[in-house]
Amino acid sequence: MHAKAKHDLQELPAYKAYFDSIKAMEYKYPLPILGAKAYQRGYDLPYAWGASAVYFTQSQLINISEISLGINGGELVDFSDFIGFGPTTAVTNAYTFRPDVWVLPFLNLYGIVGAGTTETGVTLLEPISFETTQNFTASSFGIGATLAGRWGPVLLIWDNNYNFVDVDVIVEPVPAFNSSLRIGHNFMDPRRPDRMLTVWTGAFYQKINSNTRGSISVGDIFPSIGTGKNIEHLRDWASELPPGQRVIANQIIDKLEEFNDGHDVEDATIEYNLQKEVAQPLNLILGAQYQLNKNWMFRTEIGVFGKRSQFLMNLNYRFQGFVPRR
């Protein structure tokens, strides 16, 4: 985030000396490109290099439109017309590390690496009414870019990233595209030119890969299938399925019955392929950042409205880099 001396602060002794020194300094660092010219014009740029520790949690509704099933690595068969889902809620808790660099005064590039957990609450409506919650561990990695600038007193920040989440029961990492637009304002400390509070509002958009393939053990996905009446109901449901679906359904029901009777079914896995989408990809964000000095910044942000809520905390450390040898 860039800050230029405001006219009503320029006459304060601390600000006048500070911005006079910025305009007069010999900038020797290679990044950001055009940094020397920006300082000569009175722009107080953030230090080029940074690293952030980030905590992020999110809860959102997911719609499942298609499902294919198999068992023990066998062929997948489409069950979309025979299985009905209610609301599916995905809750994510992630801890990430983000190195970043300002390559231009208005362009920041960063990487993402981290780990966390995901909890998915699935409501099954057909063929039986059943709710289950699945807990998984996950790792993540990704890249992103931020464009930042100023229009008069208004800050404009546009951030985009691709983040790949590797969940332990999913065959391939799930890519997610995140985009956010923020409009904000700096509130400067009249005694400390390098200290400020920035507040903003904006919008957050997320798109996840619609196709997810994985496998999970019968005991994990149905930890409490209930009484034998549920098994009987499933048998009746399977008897009316087309031949291909009936074979897979009965194989799964056999394992469910064994599990319900107390037998070990750890070797039985259900293979699945889901077509899913975020119920509402857009929501509102509100946030603030406190810059203690040019090295340390603390940021927090919440997402509200829509069918997603989120919360973020970010501790950022910045440094200028290294002067190249001559």
Image: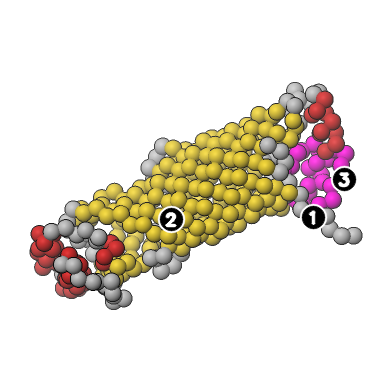
**Who comes first in sequence, dot 1 or dot 3?**
3
Q: Position of residue 117 (x, y in %)?
A: 43, 55
Whole-angstrom CA distance, mark 2 to mark 1, is 37 Å
Determine the residue positioned at 58% across, 45% down: 314
Q: As displayed, is residue 251 above or below residue 59? A: below
Determine the residue positioned at 58% across, 54% down: 97
Q: Is residue 153 visible?
A: no
Label 1 sits on a secondary structure element that is: loop
Name the disc covering residue 26, or none: 3
Q: Nearer the viewer, mark 2 or mark 1?
A: 2
**Residue 212 placement: quadrant:** bottom left
**Who comes first in sequence, dot 2 or dot 3?**
3
The amino acid type, in three-letter code, at marker 2 is: Thr
The amino acid type, in three-letter code, at marker 1 is: Phe
Q: Nearer the viewer, residue 325 or 41?
A: 325
Q: Position of residue 239 (x, y in %)?
A: 10, 68
Whole-angstrom CA distance, mark 2 to mark 3, is 47 Å
Q: As displayed, is residue 253 above or below residue 23? A: below
Q: Quadrant of the N terminus?
A: top right
Q: Quadrant of the C terminus?
A: bottom right
Q: Is residue 152 magenta?
A: no
Label 2 sits on a secondary structure element that is: strand
Q: Is residue 24 magenta?
A: yes
Start-end of magenta stretch: 23-46
Q: Nearer the viewer, residue 131 or 66?
A: 131
Determine the residue positioned at 67% across, 47% down: 317
The amino acid type, in three-letter code, at marker 3 is: Glu
